[in-house]
Amino acid sequence: MMVVGSLALLTLFLSVASFIAVDNDGQQRASERMETNMRVAWEVLGGYGNSYRLADGRIYAGLQPLNDFEVAVDRINELVGGTATVFMGDTRVATNVVEADGSRALGTKLAPGPIYDAVLGSGTPYRGEADVLGTSYFTAYDPIKTMAGETIGILAVAVPQADILSGLAGLQTKLLVVSGLTLLLVGAGAFFMARRMVSPLAALKETITNVARGRIDQAVPHTDRGDEIGAIARAVADLRGAVAEQQQLKAANIAEERQKEDDRQRQDEEAAGYVRAHEFFMSEVEAGFGRLAKGDLTARLNKPFSQDYEGLRALFNETVANLEGAFSNVIGLVRSTHDGISEMVTATNDLSQRTEVQAANLEETVAALGEVTGAVNETANGADDARKVASAARHKAAQGGEVVKQAVQAMNEIETSSKQISSIISVIDEIAFQTNLLALNAGVEAARAGEAGKGFAVVAQEVRGLAQRSAEAAK
């Protein structure tokens, strides 16, 4: 197939190259023809003189005025064919170029353009194609100069392109016909060969397309052939096996990546839950210790913690409950002591008043004994009264001793309560120590967790600070 295609391309290339070569040959012939015509035209004008000038509104070759001098241009046409024209400046003054009405195109102007610029503007010859009064010509323009080198006119010769290219056009037509027939024959051969190869190639194309799309459930045809198609089929079979293996590896990689993603999400969720649990723990513990620091012994951690901190919550609640009970006992003992002391003070005051009364009575009795030395009965009666007063005083003294005993007992109970408070403070200090140790361990775990444990490390630091403040408050 490639050979046939190459032959077709070669045939087309040769046809185009031949066509271009014929065209270039025509251009070369036209250029040579124009140079020949120009030499003949100068020889004809040179027969009238080799110097050119302007005088009396005419252009002269030697002594011969060239204006309306048709003999020279017709002679050039007789010798080489084509047309010849003499310009005075840019105006045609002698020519065998005829217009549509059959008259010579005298007095017409040279149109501005490349010819005008080259010959009249720069004083240089011009060769090329040009349109003269609606007809395509191969042209040659030479400046007519004075002896001083001044350009005063133009000598132009031209040949219609149809005169030169008519023979070449027939040749090109024949080349095109031959090229077309050759391409037709080559195309027919290519079609025949393609018919033999397209069927298996179409099946292989479909198989390759399926393999490219990942469909490997169909067998590869024509692998048993010994030609190039068989080699292609076997290569496609190898490709099919490679694609199957790649699909298996891809499926395994996808499953592994999915498992890794699931593990990562689970770890992220666990880390987030751990952080939330610690944040909640910090918030509740800080609030509880805050209430406890303000003297609120009814503070309790009522909201449940995570499993890691539930034991600490129970210990906190139990400790605060014990502390509240101890302080309640101390307050009761203080109140009892206060009541006992108040009763003792009252009894002591009463005893003092009665003692003063008895002392006054004794003073009166002594005075009466001094005055009534002879009244024994009165003295006996006074002694009997004194005995009663002393007995009452002894009874009051006994009551005062009982009150003092109760006061001593109350002080002993206060001492016992103080020991209990000291024990509770020791428990609080132990809780603070354990919390500080737990926060330190949490900080180590956060450091091991890396970037995901930075937030938890801050929480652990706050727990340690709170534990230290609790220990200082207990002291």
Image (spheres, rainbow, N blue to C red):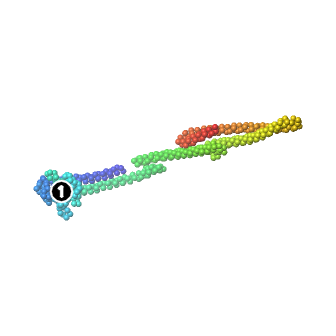
Residue name at image x 14 percent, y 60 percent: 68
Q: How crowded is mark 1: few (under 14 residues within 10 Å), some or many (20 or more)?
A: some
Residue 425 location, x and y as percent?
Answer: 66, 38
Is 417 displayed left or right of 226 in the figure? Answer: right
Q: Would residue 181 be seen by someone viewing this image from the given angle?
A: no
**How many numbered markers are drawn?**
1
Is 351 displayed left or right of 429 in the figure? Answer: right
Looking at the image, the residue that sits furthest to the left is 63
Residue 166 location, x and y as percent?
Answer: 23, 57
Q: Quadrant of residue 378?
A: top right
Q: In which quarter of the image is residue 111?
A: bottom left
Depth check: 85 or 459 in front? 459
Is 236 displayed left or right of 155 in the figure? Answer: right
Residue name at image x 14 percent, y 58 percent: 57
Identify the residue position indicated by label 1 in the image: 89
Label 1 residue SS: loop
Depth check: 132 or 386 in front? 386
